[in-house]
Amino acid sequence: MATLLVALTAITIIASRLRAEQSTAHLFAVLAVQPLNLLALLFAGLRLTVLSGGAAPVWPAIKASSLSSTLLYLLPSRLSELVKPIYLSTQGHLSLLRGIAIVAMERFLDVAIVALLGLAGMLLLSHDGAAPATVWWVALAAVCAAGCILLVWKPALIHAIIDLVPIARLRAGLTRLLDDLIATMSPWRLLLGLLFGLCAWACSFAMIYVLLRLSASVPLDLSAAFLVFLAGTIGIAVAVAPGGVGTFEAGMILALRYHGIDAGEAIALALLSRLANLGFVPLIAVWAAAADGIGVARLVEAARNLRQTQSEG
């Protein structure tokens, strides 16, 4: 909660230093991009539904995604992702273990998408030093693709590798997780999950692009806006603080400065992007928790206990 309050306080301070008409324009920009933010949430829910084979209906999947996105600001690292299987299991849609397997598959697809985004960014920059980095991004995407192919067409090979694990408890847990992943995976589910994931990421990028077009004093074209979006995405990926607070803003500020925007405006735009990313999603999450009688504190405690159990295993 502290990180969320710090982010909102910083946004308020920056906004208070702007002229009244600027504040109104920035508020309009944040509100104007919320349909794209909600559309990204819809695609995230659709992906969860597809990967679950329809076991998790769309609306519960959307509520699970909103809870996870909101609690990202309360929980360290990717602990908030465990909120999805916990919520869906308490609602009777999925077993906890299968929900964890689906979330693992989501993250696998996201890594592949981010690798492709990074590759596109390297190609856009097209500097002399971009070639080695491009090789690494291609290699990362290839590893993710190879993992998906093995899960779908050669699961026996992965079973054979797991059988080599010397710790019986860990081996049994990995076997159960793999079995649930295999049950989750199929070529069509994988392709649809990747498609909905790409749509969600596209909506997130479109939201940042429109926000910058409406708010930045220096016009940024699609390529420039994409590099700013990519910098923020990498900032979240390498973050230690919950919600990527600090690293997300730092990445965006550096990219905005690179494109000729002064430091003060770059800070304001980075904080506005944070506010736009939040949008109405926390309201949906709070409503979902209240309507389904699930306390946020209970979800947080369950996620922490689950992570501790996994670490001990």
Image (spheres, grey):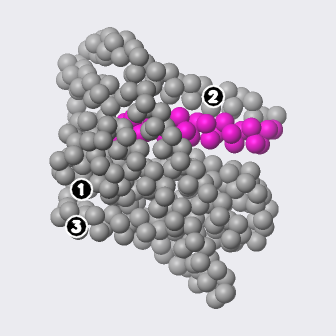
Q: Is residue 73 above or below residue 175?
A: below
Q: Of circles 3 and 1, which is in front?
A: 3
Q: Is residue 273 left or right of residue 284?
A: right
Q: Residues within 10 Å of mark 2 (few under 14, many from 20)?
A: some
Viewer-nearest residue: 200 or 307:
200
Q: CA distance from mark 3 to mark 1?
A: 14 Å
Instruction: Name the residue located 53 percent from the left edge and 47 percent from the top edge.
Output: 199
Q: CA distance from mark 3 to mark 2?
A: 44 Å
> Can you give x and y, in whole percent of width and height, for residue 43 in the image?
45, 51
Viewer-nearest residue: 280 or 50:
50
The disc at residue 138 is: 2
Q: Is residue 217 above or below residue 44?
A: below
> Can you give x and y, in whole percent of width and height, for residue 39 in the image?
49, 58
**Residue 110 in magenta stretch:** yes
SS for tag 2?
helix
Amino acid at dot 1: Leu
- Disc 1 marks which residue? 299
SS for tag 1?
helix
Q: Residues within 10 Å of mark 3 (few under 14, many from 20)?
A: few
For the N terminus, which image quadrant? bottom left
Q: Is residue 267 above or below residue 22?
A: above
Viewer-nearest residue: 182 or 220:
182
Which span is picked out in magenta?
103-127
Instruction: Name the residue located 40 percent from the left edge and 33 percent from the top edge.
Output: 189
Residue 142 falls in image quadrant = top right
SS for tag 3?
helix
Residue 123 falls in image quadrant = top right
* Main SS class of the magenta portion in the image: helix
Amino acid at dot 3: Ala
- Disc 3 marks which residue? 291
Instruction: Name the residue located 58 percent from the left edge and 50 percent from the top edge.
Output: 202
Amino acid at dot 2: Val
